[in-house]
Structure formats: structure tokens, C-alpha cells
């Protein structure tokens, strides 16, 4: 039978575990016109949460128009405006006549061509041959124009926002400042920005480069943190899914899966799936250990590639972290792990933060990825030669 554990796609609203308070908070914000931001590390459930929130909003009376756009493949300001305009068109127009009417009414300056689908899998699309500054201004304000035209509030969800802004280089601050000023003036349009990266108050963070004090989006949006999924809810879910297939996993093993992955939703689902597929009747310790090794092998090449890109000093820093050392600048630790000096420690830490391998929590470095931490500790440190 198909596995009940889902990790290959964002979850549907009814599949999302927990995070009820965050869902209600975000839905309330968007309905009352409060711009918001959902930001965290990859594979932590941001898109799944947004799915649940948009479903909840859709059930409200006089539900606003909702539109989602991913910036994962958008690298320029004008491309962003064009892509967002296309995404909004798809939410309100289904026929060539409807597309043509909207173009004539709301885009008199840019006047894009309409690409008509001819084969299965193709869709209507606006084609912009040459976007002049005047046309760009029209496209930039299109969400407001559409909200006014429809006499209906619009919610715009922009995902992978960090991809767009990081591609701007030295123009990042100017672009973000322009967007913040533009979006703040829009009436009836609410923005939800979502992206990947650290939200910690120390160390490097693209989140703080955008939303920190004195930055372009400071006070523009309210940050909605992702709640951890409680251990009991996740373990009950694991036990229940095993039982549906006539298989048995004890509470102890379900808790071990959760704790081994430190509650990380993606890895808990993945690990539980491996154990589920290896279990025919009752899950035992051998199946748990085999599942751990299988998970290591699945991600081994990715983790090895990560380590290949690290300087030797950065590897030594991670070794000290994995060994539980807390006083990284003490003479004993410096000598034991070949870190040489406090300056080397700080440089290694800064580099690892920028590569998003570690984060600083309460002035202490922590691994971002719990499975990488486990693999590094149980495989890399034991089976790889370190000079």
C-alpha cells in the first residue's frame, strides 16, 4: 500500500499537523489587512502552513481574492512585476475574452500580447516584449488596480522571496525600499512574504537584512513564527498511521523517531515512512536502526558535498560543536580541535552561519539541519579521516 507519511510535497490543509495558533494568527492578520511574513529554514512547513491558512480564509464570508507566486526562478524586478501580473490574471480570467478585457481595461500602457494555449498543458499568458519604465510602473501597481476593478480585497502570497532579493546584489536595498513604499500605499491589497533563512537575532540573516531595524521592510509586516509540532501530536499521528495499515509501532519507537529528528517535520515524516515500509507486523529496534542507516545513505551525497565545500577550520569547528564543546575559545578546545586561536573560531563561525549550516541561539552555535548534525556526528566524525 502507499505510505501515509507525506514529505515529497507541501501538505494539503487537512493534512497539516498542529500549528493551530499560528494558522489563526496569520489568517486573522491577512483578513484585516495586516501584511505578514513567514520565514524559516527549508523544509520546515512554510508552504503547508500557508495552504492551511488560505483554506481557512476561503471559508470566510466575502473571502478576498488570493494569489500565490514563487520567486524561485525570478531574478529581476521587471520579471517579478510581469510574473505577478500573470499570476493575478490566472485567478480572475478563464477565457480569451476575459483576458482581453482585463488587458484593455487595466494595462493600457504595457499592452502585452496574450499567448493562447494550443496544446495540452499550455495556459494563457501575458507576453511583454519590451517593458518601459512607464509600463513597469503600471505593472508594479497592478495588484491595486485589480483590487479596485473587482471592488474586492486581494491577498498576494510571495514565496521564496529571498531568491529575488538576493539576486539584486548591490541593488537589494533600493529594490526592497521601493517595494515597501509601493505596497504600503496599496489599499485593499495585503502581502504575505515567505522565504528561507535564519530569523535569529545574531549572526548573518537575509531576514534581518530585509526586516531588521533600519532595513527596507522594518515594521512593514508582522513576523509569524512557525510553531514546533508537539511531540505527542506527532507520535500519535505516527502510531495512528501504522495502525491504519495493520502495523504496530510502540509509543517508545514513535517518540524515538520524533526525538532523533528533533521534531523536524520533514525528517520525522521521512524517517517514519522508512520505518513504516520496513515493518510488516511489529516494528522493532533492528528496523529502527536500519531506518536510521537508510536515511543516512539517502542524504549522504548531499551531506558529503556540503562538507567538501568547507575549509578545514570549519570542519574542526563543527567537530567541536558535535562533541558538545561549549567553551570553543578555551585553550583546551583550541588545541584539541586544531582551532589555533579565537580569531580562527570567529571566522569559522561566521562562514558557517553564512552558509546556513549553523545558527546562533542565545549566543551558542547550533546545527540548522538535525539530520546533518546526526550524520556528521555518527558518520563523518567516525569514518572520515581528519588531518
Image: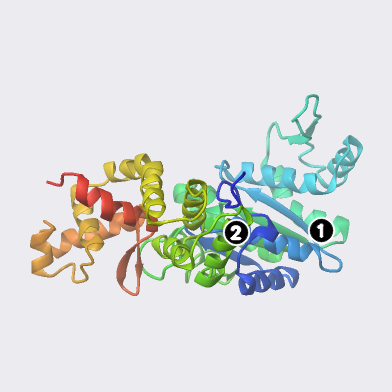
Q: For the view shown, which residue lies furthest in the front direction?
A: 281
- CA gap between label 2 and label 1 equals 48 Å
Q: How many marks?
A: 2
Q: Identify the residue under disc 2.
A: 243
Image point 69% across, 42% down: which residue?
A: 82
Above or below, 329 against 47 in this view is: below
For residue 341, side relative to residue 269 (left or right): left
How dense is the environment of label 2, judged by Cα within 10 Å: few (below 14), some, or many (20 and up)? few
Q: Residue at x 46, y 53 (%)?
A: 271
> Is the residue under label 1 in contact with that under label 2 (CB below 8 Å)?
no
Choose between 64 and 214: the one closer to the eye.
64
Q: Position of residue 161 (x, y in %)?
A: 56, 53
- x, y percentage for residue 310? 26, 46
- Say which element carries label 2: helix
Work out whether residue 178 can be spotted. Answer: no
Of residues 349 and 370, the one nearer the viewer is 370
On screen, residue 47 above or below 73: below
Count residues near mark 1 (Cα–Cα under 10 Å), then give few for <14, some for 14-19, many for 20+.
some
The residue identified by callout 1 is 147
Q: Quadrant of the N terminus?
A: top right
User: Is residue 239 at all visible to an observer of this figure?
Assistant: yes
The answer to whether 180 appears left or right of 59 in the picture is left
User: Residue 163 at x, y = what percent?
Assistant: 52, 48
Residue drawn at (74%, 61%), measured in percent from left and top? 55
Is residue 257 or residue 251 the one in the foreground? Answer: 251
Which percent across, then down, holds residue 198?
A: 44, 62
Residue drawn at 76 percent across, 65 percent down = 57
Amino acid at each position: 500500500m502507499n505510505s501515509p507519511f507525506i514529505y515529497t510535497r507541501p501538505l494539503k490543509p487537512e493534512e497539516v499537523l498542529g500549528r493551530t495558533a499560528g494558522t489563526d494568527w496569520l489568517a486573522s492578520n491577512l483578513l484585516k489587512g495586516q501584511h505578514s511574513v513567514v520565514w524559516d529554514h527549508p523544509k520546515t512547513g512554510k508552504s503547508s502552513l500557508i495552504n492551511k491558512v488560505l483554506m481557512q480564509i476561503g471559508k470566510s464570508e466575502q473571502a478576498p481574492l488570493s494569489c500565490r507566486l514563487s520567486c524561485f526562478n525570478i531574478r529581476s524586478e521587471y520579471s517579478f512585476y510581469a510574473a505577478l501580473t500573470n499570476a493575478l490574471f490566472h485567478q480572475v480570467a478563464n477565457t480569451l475574452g476575459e483576458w482581453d478585457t482585463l488587458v484593455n481595461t487595466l494595462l493600457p500602457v504595457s499592452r502585452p500580447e496574450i499567448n493562447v494555449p494550443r496544446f495540452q498543458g499550455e495556459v494563457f499568458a501575458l507576453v511583454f516584449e519590451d517593458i518601459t519604465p512607464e509600463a513597469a510602473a503600471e505593472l508594479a501597481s497592478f495588484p491595486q488596480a485589480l483590487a479596485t476593478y473587482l471592488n474586492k480585497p486581494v491577498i498576494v502570497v510571495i514565496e521564496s522571496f529571498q531568491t529575488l532579493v538576493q539576486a539584486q546584489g548591490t541593488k537589494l536595498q533600493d529594490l526592497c525600499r521601493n517595494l515597501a513604499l509601493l505596497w504600503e500605499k496599496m489599499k485593499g491589497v495585503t502581502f504575505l512574504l515567505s522565504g528561507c533563512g535564519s530569523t535569529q537575532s545574531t549572526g548573518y540573516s537575509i531576514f534581518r537584512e530585509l526586516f531588521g531595524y533600519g532595513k527596507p521592510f522594518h515594521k512593514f509586516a508582522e513576523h509569524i513564527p512557525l510553531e514546533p509540532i508537539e511531540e505527542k501530536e506527532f507520535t500519535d499521528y505516527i502510531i495512528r498511521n501504522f495502525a491504519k495499515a495493520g502495523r504496530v509501532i510502540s509509543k517508545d519507537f514513535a517518540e524515538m523517531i520524533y526525538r532523533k529528528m528533533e521534531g523536524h517535520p520533514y525528517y520525522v515524516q521521512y524517517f517514519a515512512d522508512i520505518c513504516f515500509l520496513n515493518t510488516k507486523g511489529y516494528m522493532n529496534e533492528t528496523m529502527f536502526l536500519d531506518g536510521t542507516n537508510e536515511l543516512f545513505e539517502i542524504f549522504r551525497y548531499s551531506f558529503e558535498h556540503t562538507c567538501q565545500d568547507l575549509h578545514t577550520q570549519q570542519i574542526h569547528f563543527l567537530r567541536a560543536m558535535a562533541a558538545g564543546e561549549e567553551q570553543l575559545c578555551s585553550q583546551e578546545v583550541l588545541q584539541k580541535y586544531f582551532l589555533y586561536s579565537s580569531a580562527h573560531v570567529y571566522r569559522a563561525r561566521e562562514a558557517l552561519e553564512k552558509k546556513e549550516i549553523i545558527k546562533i541561539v542565545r549566543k551558542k552555535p547550533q546545527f540548522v539541519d538535525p539530520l546533518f548534525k546526526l550524520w556528521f556526528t555518527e558518520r563523518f566524525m567516525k569514518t572520515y579521516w581528519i588531518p
